[in-house]
Image (cartoon, rainbow, N blue to C red):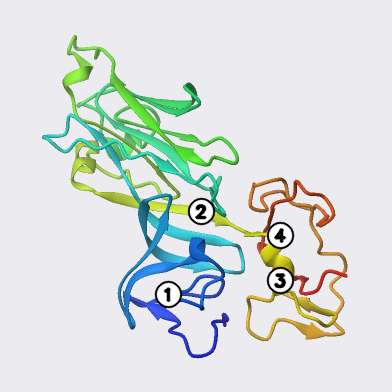
Amino acid sequence: MFMTLSGYESTCGGIAIPYPFGMKEGCFLDERFKIQHCNSSSGDPTLTVNGTDLVVNYISVYSSKIYVNFPIVFTNCEGKDRNTVVDLEGSPFVFSPENYFFASGCDNLAMMNQNNSAIGECLSICDENRDPLIAGCSGINCCQTRIPSNLKVFNVTMKGVDGRDGSVGEKKCRHAYLSYLSYYGGDPSDMKDVDSVGVVLDWGIDRRAFESLVNTFSFEGNPYLYGNCQEGTTYGSYRRKIKAKMAGLEENCVVDLSHDSDDFISSKINQILCRIL
């Protein structure tokens, strides 16, 4: 069971919206956790991050993850060109390392960029005679690779490479995207008909908000989970030191609230101190 504030809707479009997220004024921690486009229990719950709308599929308080629909980048796909830059800087969100970077289409070199430098790339070589179910996503018609840790910006450029048949890659349909699921399972050209794919973001709360939310008693547990703050329970040391602005992605650390650089505290662990002693 998850916790919502009394008197407020707890679902939107069939999706549970737990605190610190919320839909109406007063029921979310701050504007960064506001879920929009909901009319009572209907609608598509949408999280807006720096001007980009992301439809929400699931929010986990236990693991501090939010699953969203993420736009695919297209080039030369029958007029369906799109190059959306998704910037999470300044937000409590970061791309989870569970995601992979995918490039598909014929002779497609896709590069992730940051500060005018490539930080990752994938090359998809075209072979129309290769059975996609056998080839998988290993570089023939589709390529996948892990993303850099603590990725905050998704900015992709794609360029064609000359195919082995002498064709010019620049004229061919190409696509690139992030996803925690492999959407490749057939003809890669089918991706031009897909508008978005599933991505998972890790999230945390900033240290000042955390301090304002803690209980006034020596309870332990996760304050976001209903009934999970219990008096007198001992779970050992579940304090963590959170790397600056990384939304609590480090494991086995200690929360050091006296250090000014620890800007974000994650609710990733199930038992955290409700009160900082």
Q: Nearer the viewer, mark 4 or mark 2?
A: 4
Left or right of 109? Residue 188 is left
Percent across and percent down for residue 234 are: 87, 77
Label annotation for residue 170: none
Residue type indicated by callout 2: Leu
Q: Is residue 264 left or right of residue 183?
A: right
Residue 125, horizontal then vertical, whole percent: 31, 22
Of pointers 1 and 4, the one earlier in the residue sequence = 1
Looking at the picture, how far across and down is residue 94, in whole percent?
54, 48
What's the CA distance linking mark 3 and mark 1? Answer: 21 Å
The label on residue 201 is 2
Q: Which residue in the protein does label 4 denote?
A: 207
Q: Going from the N terminus, do you reach mark 4 or mark 3 first?
A: 4
Q: Type of residue at label 1? A: Met
| Label 4: element kind | helix
**What residue is disc 3 on?**
212
Q: How far, Cα to Cα, is label 1 from label 4?
A: 23 Å
Mark 3 touches mark 1? (CB < 8 Å) = no
Quarter occupied by residue 112: top left
Per the image, label 1 sits on a secondary structure element best described as: loop
Residue beneath disc 1: 23
Compute the Cα span from label 2 to label 1: 19 Å
Of discs 2 and 1, which sits in the foreground?
1
Q: Residues within 10 Å of mark 1 (few under 14, many from 20)?
A: many
Relative to 228, 102 lies left or right: left
Spot occupied by residue 171 in the image (x, y as percentages of width and height): 16, 20
Amino acid identity at mark 3: Ser
